[in-house]
Amino acid sequence: MRRSVNIWTRIDKLTIIIFSVMVIMGWFNIYAAVYNEEHKEILDFSQRYGKQFIWILASFILAIIVVIIDTRFYLFFSWAVYGVLIFLLILVLFIGKEVNGARSWFEFGSLSLQPSEFAKFATALALASYLNDHRQELTKLRSILPAVGIILLPALLTSRQPDMGSTIVFFSFFIVLFREGMSPYVFVSGLLAIILFFLTLLIDNVILETGLVVVAFFLTWFVTKKIRLSLSGIGIILLTGGLLFLLDHFVLESLGYENIIIVTLILAGLTFTYYIYQKKAFGILVIYLFLIGSVLYINTVDMAFNTLLKPHQRERVEIMLGFKSDPHGTGYNLNQSLISVGSGGFGGKGYLQGTQTKFKFVPAQSTDFIFCTVGEEWGFIGSLVIVGLYLFLFLRLIKLAERQRSVFSRIYGYGVVSVLFTHFFINIGMTIGLVPVIGIPLPFFSYGGSSLWGFTILLFIFLRLDASRTEYLI
């Protein structure tokens, strides 16, 4: 077994430099976001930028502690860490402090901690530990279900707080499952479900379902290379649908167009059962099941949208899709964010010169909307630099993950990338109107001890594992 004499000589210094640059840049942006003429000193500990300096110092201390700990600790105690954080996620529902309608915080005097931020690295550890033993069996349901359970348990608990931002982040771990051998059908199905969700809100259900039938026709033609077979399927659907429409119009008068489409597809599919069985045409079977599943899913979207989402969450989605304009109500955050980012122009207004920032037009401008300060004061060029810095970090982490000899380390590395990328994409996406406003910090930039510490531990555990990649974990 090979041991490193000095772990500090093997740790990836480029990633540490990127981390340090981001943290310092974030600190200066927090200073600009909540700049106070009466408290100009950046180390004024009564202000957020002064407090963030303390969080930053503590994060560097945490990073050192994480690197000092032996790598085997993270493997052998991964389930214990996960169990403790799950317990804290349950406990916070009962005794946590409520902030902005969410019971997500433990309060210890002037210090508040959000357990969901730490549950992310705990989930990454537990998932890596499980997949380390079951990586060759992710095509089997009995192996996939426990992995899905590891992801869904913290997601369910954070949704009860409710903290929809963290809930969505936990779903990013499905990227790890896909990387480790889960069927691409599952991953693609998830992406299609998200796309269909928004398409259902934008397009009439009957038109969308008709479009899916057309897509299924072309897919069948592409897979089988038999135009007659594809045309026969369309003919059967049109004939069956026509007869059902006439029956409903003159006799039943109660089915409705959507039910007619569903019954038509079921009946039409039955006529191909024998052909699929005889020819072993599993490709056609997959296309048909996709079509039926998509149509049934479309008919549940409206119900889910109106019952599962809270009113303010529905409004945010509707504003993003352009259904509603509410610049002084629910849409105020997004409207001011777009004004702030857009006003920066190409080169920005200059550091501490942001009018939107100075006059506090953008709510949560030091936390969820910190990127607005970047856009306004640094402009397009500065924003491009920040985005480029993040993309370079993600590519670097992927490279580190792929060079791991330990399966546990590789899986954990992809968990780190998935979490950080999801935070990055959603946070910047919501400031420019690409995704609904759900409240999620920008890694290493946003104000807050819990998020900064959580991201620091998440990242430096991986750097510690990478530094010991030549060692055997077990």
Image (tube, rainbow, N blue to C red):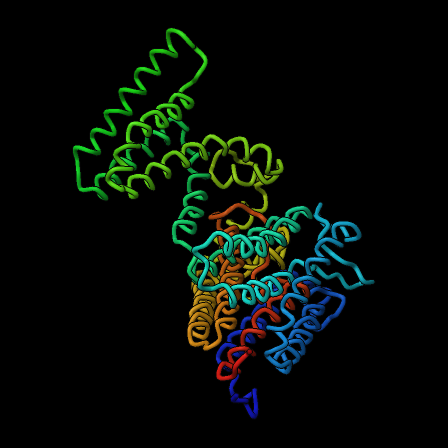
From the viewer's perspective, tell me whether residue 264 is left or right of residue 104: left
- The correct choice, above or below, for 139 with respect to 278 in the image is below
Q: Is residue 228 left or right of residue 168?
A: left
Write down the quadrant of residue 238 in the picture: top left
Q: Residue furthest top?
A: 250
Residue drawn at x 70%, y 48% as measured from the top left: 102
Q: Is residue 29 visible?
A: no
- Estimate the x, y position of residue 232 in percent, counting from the top left: 21, 28
Residue 243 appears left or right of 145: left
Q: Residue at x 56, y 71 (%)?
A: 459
Q: Nearer the viewer, residue 38 or 472?
A: 472
In x, y percent, where is residue 430?
52, 50
Res. 64 image quadrant:
bottom right
Between residues 39 and 175, which one lies in front from this camera angle? 175
Count of numbered circles in the view:
0
Camera-side residue: 61 or 180? 180
In the depicted structure, whether residue 225 falls above or below residue 210 = below
Considering every residue shown, the one lying at the far right of the view is 109
Residue 407 appears left or right of 212: right
Q: Position of residue 120 (x, y in %)?
A: 60, 61
In the picture as drawn, the residue positioned furthest to the bottom comes out as 5
Residue visible at 62% across and 68% down in the picture: 78
Above or below, comparing residue 250 to residue 391 in the picture = above
Does any portion of residue 265 appear in the rendered image?
Answer: yes
